[in-house]
Image: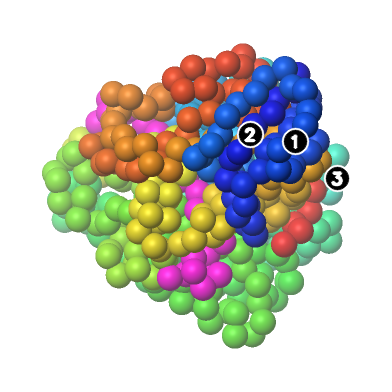
């Protein structure tokens, strides 16, 4: 099918101009003023912004955690992402200790195959690095197109690896041009503080926050940077949330080290005062927890300074009944919050319209940088001839209110309930098909495909 989008204002990480876009099959075949082509469908985009489909490189769909599963699966999660202008997500395959990386990949594929509306890929979370695991790194990168490997510096006993395993993994991944990402918090220190608070009867959600002070994140971020510097692997810090951790990144740049950094939309907009709402605060129990106003200011500045490269979501929703597992003990509250649908509209409204970032920077941190870092650029992450026709047609003036009553996330509350935003994703194209048009889904479940990735190109 051919589609002609006329008179839209095209925004990429580098460009800002008005033109037509002609799409044939899955890709963009021409861009220009007043294109004289015949198309099956013509979409008038006068007054609208056109930007590349968002890439969210940090989501958890159908994820087993703390005795339950995140409430969005591949069907509901990728559909909600599309409504919010995100056309590709990268989820985390998590190795079970004692089992192979391939067994984990097969388990995740059993949940994702044929179920996704949007495109997706995987990071491989290594929780047990040994000689057998080591032998799987090369085929994961070269055969499966999974080029990024996640590590946890927290959650001892289930997810955490020690520094010896971390360095071993980094050295192996470096051989084949892959990337190592990490959840950088000091797990042992956090475990000590959690146990201390529980023993003292401090059991409300506030103590989830107080058990993960800034130092636990800044220390681990610095240690990860040092190990990456030693091994020369390409490093990426996920969901960086605070000024102290960002300052560790800043210090690393003084020795000419490049570290890719991701923050999440909630850390830019929400703060720790939400932990003063009694058990309702469980809605915002996530790790790392929400931080202070000064941390928000540091993160916004970090984006402008080029220290923070990606704004993701860490989308990991749990319904209220699931959260209530921790009603009498904060340590039993499933960690995570919904956000996959809200990222782009929130960042436009609170970032671009409030002069905290340019339109080009907005596209950079929601799409282009992820595409480059995770090896799918220029097929994804830009609007250019030959690129996949993943395009968001965006009304920059439409006001609407975020609410669980109207979102498409499979979660019965929103962390942004009642927040009015300006800017709305109106039509979303995925590989040359109109996937979302207003309130309608026009593609079928299973249209989303698993994307094999190459090496970092940034």
In the image, 37: left or right of 275? right
Name the quadrant containing residue 430: top right
Q: Position of residue 208 (x, y in %)?
A: 28, 52
At mark 3, the secondary structure is helix
The residue shown at (74%, 71%) is: 232
Residue depth check, mark 3 versus mark 1: number of the one nearer the observer = 1
Residue 256 seen in render: yes
Q: Look at the numbered disc 2 and give the secondary structure of its residue.
A: strand
In which quadrant will I find the C terminus?
bottom right
Residue 412 painted magenta = no
Residue 362 is labelled as none
Q: What residue is drawn where x is 66% and y is 77%?
A: 257
Q: CA distance from mark 3 to mark 1?
A: 40 Å
Q: Is residue 46 above or below residue 16?
A: above
For the image shown, how many numbered marks are present on the structure?
3
Question: x%, y% of residue 244?
Answer: 40, 73
Q: Is residue 173 left or right of residue 5?
A: right
Local secondary structure at mark 1: loop
| Residue corresponding to mark 2 | 6
Q: Residues within 10 Å of mark 3 (few under 14, many from 20)?
A: some
Instruction: Indicate the quadrant containing the N terminus: top left, top right, bottom left or bottom right.
Output: top right
- The residue that label 1 is drawn on is 35
Residue 288 occupies which quadrant of the picture?
Answer: bottom left
Q: Which residue is mark 3?
A: 142
> Which residue is at the front of the view, 170 or 16?
16
- The answer to whether residue 239 shows anywhere in this view is no
Instruction: Please tell me whether residue 442 is drawn above or below residue 394 in the rendered image.
Output: above
Residues at marks 3 and 2 touching, judged by CB atoms closer than 8 Å: no
* Residue numbers of the magenta segment: 301-326
């Amino acid at each position: 099918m051919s589609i002609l989008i006329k008179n839209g204002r095209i925004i990429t990480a580098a460009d800002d101009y008005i033109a037509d876009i002609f799409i044939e099959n899955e890709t963009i075949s021409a861009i220009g003023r007043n294109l004289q082509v015949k198309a099956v469908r013509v979409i008038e985009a006068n007054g609208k912004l056109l930007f590349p489909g968002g890439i969210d490189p940090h989501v958890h769909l159908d994820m087993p955690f703390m005795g339950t599963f995140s409430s969005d699966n591949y069907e509901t999660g990728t559909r909600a992402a599309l409504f919010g202008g995100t056309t590709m997500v990268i989820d985390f395959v998590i190795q079970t200790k004692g089992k192979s990386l391939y067994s984990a990949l097969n388990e995740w594929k059993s949940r994702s195959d044929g179920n996704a509306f949007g495109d997706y890929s995987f990071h491989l979370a290594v929780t047990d690095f040994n000689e057998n695991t080591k032998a799987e790194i090369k085929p994961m990168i070269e055969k499966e197109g999974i080029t990024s490997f996640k590590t946890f510096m927290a959650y001892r006993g289930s997810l955490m690896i020690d520094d010896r395993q971390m360095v071993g993994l980094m050295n192996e991944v470096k051989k084949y041009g892959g990337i190592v990402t990490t959840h950088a918090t000091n797990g042992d220190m956090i475990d000590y503080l959690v146990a201390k608070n529980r023993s003292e009867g401090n059991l409300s959600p506030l103590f989830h926050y107080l058990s993960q002070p800034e130092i636990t994140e800044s220390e681990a971020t610095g240690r990860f940077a040092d190990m990456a510097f030693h091994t020369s692997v390409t490093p990426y810090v996920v969901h960086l949330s605070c000024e102290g951790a960002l300052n560790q990144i800043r210090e690393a740049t003084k020795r000419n080290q490049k570290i890719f950094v991701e923050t999440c939309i909630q850390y830019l907009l929400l703060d720790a005062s939400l932990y003063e709402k009694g058990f309702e605060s469980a809605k915002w129990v996530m790790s790392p927890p929400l931080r202070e106003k000064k941390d928000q200011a540091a993160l916004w500045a970090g984006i402008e300074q080029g220290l923070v490269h990606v704004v993701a979501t860490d989308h990991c929703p749990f319904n209220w009944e699931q959260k209530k597992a921790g009603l009498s003990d904060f340590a039993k509250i499933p960690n995570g919050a919904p956000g996959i649908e809200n990222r782009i509209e929130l960042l436009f409204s609170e970032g671009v319209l409030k002069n905290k970032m340019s339109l080009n920077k907005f596209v950079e941190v929601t799409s282009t940088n992820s595409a480059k870092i995770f090896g799918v650029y220029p097929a994804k992450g830009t609007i250019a001839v030959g690129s996949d026709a993943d395009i968001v047609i965006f009304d920059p003036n439409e006001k609407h209110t975020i609410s669980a009553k109207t979102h498409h996330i499979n979660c019965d509350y929103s962390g942004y309930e009642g927040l009015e935003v300006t800017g709305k994703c109106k039509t979303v194209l995925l590989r040359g098909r109109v996937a979302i048009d207003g309130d309608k889904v026009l593609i079928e479940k299973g249209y989303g495909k698993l994307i094999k990735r190459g090496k970092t190109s940034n």
